[in-house]
């Protein structure tokens, strides 16, 4: 896997885990992100087959938060989906997420391969708790363009349904293969006494 290191607000992001992180924390983050992808793909596919694109908007609006809440509970973490252009303003990126999204977008535009995952580690002021932030890039696939593609190519019934649910929608204009956004997860773990300074 390609390594990424980049500084933002004095924090190093790395595409490969640092030795100090608990393997179980990284495994939890990876499993939760994978489960979200799997459940969302399954829900969207079944809904599109049953109700079409316009009838499937509720999968992202209602099912995704419920799926994420289950993963948060199962894996003891917090989870969100975010992007540079969000459909729902509540999903706007924080400063670190925005910097990472811009970095990944720049890499894609420069035709650099993107990492499958990015991890960030920091220590709280107490020095006894480590925060792991894990990010999984979400790429545009063919099925995504029906709701997130060029506005003039999105079917009229989908445009109407999106406008009703997301009046401030900016999550359009993407092409297949582009970076749609990231899944962002945050876990906290106790630092072993031997590592506490």
Image (cartoon, helix red, strand yellow):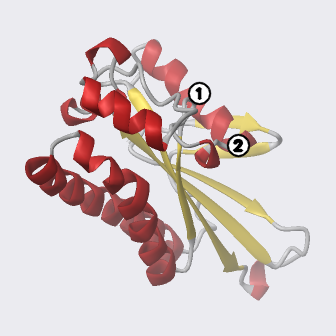
Q: What number of labels is visible?
A: 2
Report if residue 181 is visible in the image.
Answer: no
Left or right: residue 157 versus residue 132 is left
Q: Secondary structure at mark 2?
A: helix
Instruction: Give the labeled residue for mark 1.
Output: 103
Q: Nearer the viewer, residue 37 or 103?
A: 37
Disc 2 target residue? 96
Camera-nearest residue between 13 and 187: 187
Residue 16 x/y as whole percent: 50, 50
Residue 129 in the image: above or below residue 172: below
* Observer-nearest of 100 and 43: 43
Residue in view at x 46 percent, y 64 percent: 65
- Residue 45 locus on image (x, y percent): 15, 51
The extreme left residue here reads 49
Q: Residue at x 63, y 67 (%)?
A: 20
In which image quadrant can residue 142 be found? top left
Q: Earlier in the sequence, mark 1 or mark 2?
A: 2
Residue 25 horizontal side relative to residue 179, left or right: right
Can the viewer see residue 185?
Answer: yes
Relative to the observer, which residue lies in front, 60 or 106?
60
Residue at disc 1, secondary structure: helix
Q: Is residue 165 above or below residue 38?
A: above
> In percent of the image, x 22 and y 52: which residue is there?
44
């Amino acid at each position: 896997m390609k390594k990424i290191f980049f500084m933002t607000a004095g924090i190093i992001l790395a595409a490969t885990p640092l030795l100090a992180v608990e393997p179980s924390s990284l495994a939890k983050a990876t499993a939760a992100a994978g489960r979200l992808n799997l459940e969302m793909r399954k829900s969207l596919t079944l809904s599109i087959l049953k109700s079409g694109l316009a009838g499937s908007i509720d999968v992202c609006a209602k099912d995704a938060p419920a799926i994420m809440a289950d993963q948060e509970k199962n894996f003891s973490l917090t989870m969100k989906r975010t992007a540079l252009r969000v459909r729902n303003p509540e999903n706007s990126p924080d400063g670190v997420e925005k910097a990472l999204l811009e970095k990944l977008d720049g890499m894609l535009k420069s035709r650099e391969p993107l990492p499958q995952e990015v991890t960030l580690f920091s220590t709280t002021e107490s020095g006894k708790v480590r925060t792991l932030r894990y990010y999984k890039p979400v790429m545009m696939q063919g099925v995504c363009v029906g709701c997130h593609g060029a506005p003039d190519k999105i079917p009229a019934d989908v445009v109407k349904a999106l406008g009703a649910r997301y009046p401030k929608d900016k999550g359009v204009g993407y092409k297949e293969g582009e970076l749609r956004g990231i899944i962002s997860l945050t876990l906290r773990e106790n630092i072993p006494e031997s590592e506490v300074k």
